[in-house]
Amino acid sequence: MNYKDIYQKIINNAKIKNNIKEKYYEIHHIIPKCLGGNNEPNNLVNLTLKEHYICHKLLCYIYPENKSLAHAYWMMTITTIGAMENIRKDNLYIKDCEKIRRIRPFLEGESFNISAREYEWCREHWRKLTIGIKRTDVQRERISNRTKQGMQKPEVINKCRYNKDSKYYYEINTGIVHKWFPGDNDIDLTKYKWGRGPLSIEQKNKLSKTQKLNKTLCKIGKTNFRYCWYKDFIKDIPNFFIDLHQKQNNKLKKISNIILQSVGVLKDKGIFIQDDIIFKPLGKHSGLTIITPSVYEVCLDLLNELNINDIANCIYKNINIIKELNKKYLNM
């Protein structure tokens, strides 16, 4: 396949169409700056988001060893997925923020999606080109500081709970939660305390309602993991679930987190299947998270490995089977 010809056709069509009349467009350098291009008008063209994305993908095919083009393609991928994610969550703050790029075309009804295969190819392509890069101490410190600053954002703290050796701490007066990382200065124990702070009234009520639910524990066959079966919401359980009368242990919590992280991997790739895997009951138990037993049945042979990416791929490949099994197990 001649990628250069396809690239040139997109550029020529955009010039003829004159995309400046479009509701949304992005300026693209026909000859990239890293290849000697400049900001002259004859080297610039207005592209829609989809055209711009495809052009950068083609440039990576044409110049597979160019790190700058790989980085540009990777950044376009993650920012576009982020825009789609905020649209899906109906994030009004993001919608009202004119500084956020790549969200306007989705607000204006543009149909564009990045497949899991495209995401994986882009990520792997960028990873291969950056293996073995030696950074100076100044660069390492700058990257470390930016990462730590980013990790203090509340929305990031809620997502990233499993960083090795990191700890939570909170302000005694306000209750605001922060995160401490190895290498950070010791916290002032007169102003802060370790942990995520005392439970709010809302959290206490949620915990109280959950404890009153009719539930039992099961062992997942072929594994050493436990599953908390909510009789109020799950009408039937798989045959490989063995009834137990034991207290919840760490392995139950661990396998639940593995499934949730696997679903998160798919979400990051722009695959929105959460509602087929994780359920939020309506009414007074709306804060409860239920993982359908169908996931455990389909991924049974992978559970002992605890490989998040393998479980995520298994869920994605068998999503239709999981949906069908949900009719059997769920009472919702």
Image (cartoon, rainbow, N blue to C red):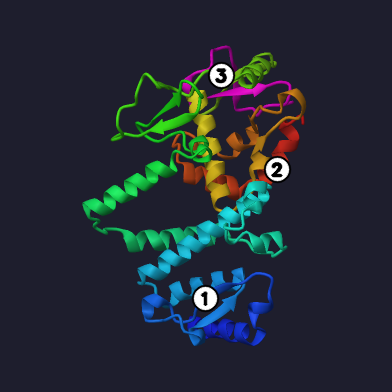
Q: Percent x, y for residue 14? A: 61, 82
Q: Which residue is mark 3?
A: 199
- Magenta-drawn stretch, dominant element (helix, strand or loop): loop
Q: Secondary structure at mark 1?
A: strand
| Above/below status of 79 relative to 258 | below
The mark nearer the N terminus, 3 or 2, is 3
Q: Which residue is mark 2?
A: 323
Q: Nearer the viewer, residue 237 or 113?
A: 113
| Above/below status of 32 relative to 163 | below
Q: Residues within 10 Å of mark 2 (few under 14, many from 20)?
A: some
Q: Secondary structure at mark 2?
A: helix
**Magenta extent:** 224-250
The type of residue carrying mark 1 is His
Q: Residue at the spot x=24%, y=52% of the render?
A: 138
Q: Is residue 202 left or right of residue 11?
A: right
- Alpha carbon of mark 1 to alpha carbon of mark 3: how far? 50 Å
- Alpha carbon of mark 1 to alpha carbon of mark 2: how far? 42 Å
Viewer-nearest of discs 3 and 2? 3
Q: Are marks 1 and 2 in contact (CB under 8 Å)?
A: no
The mark nearer the N terminus, 1 or 3, is 1
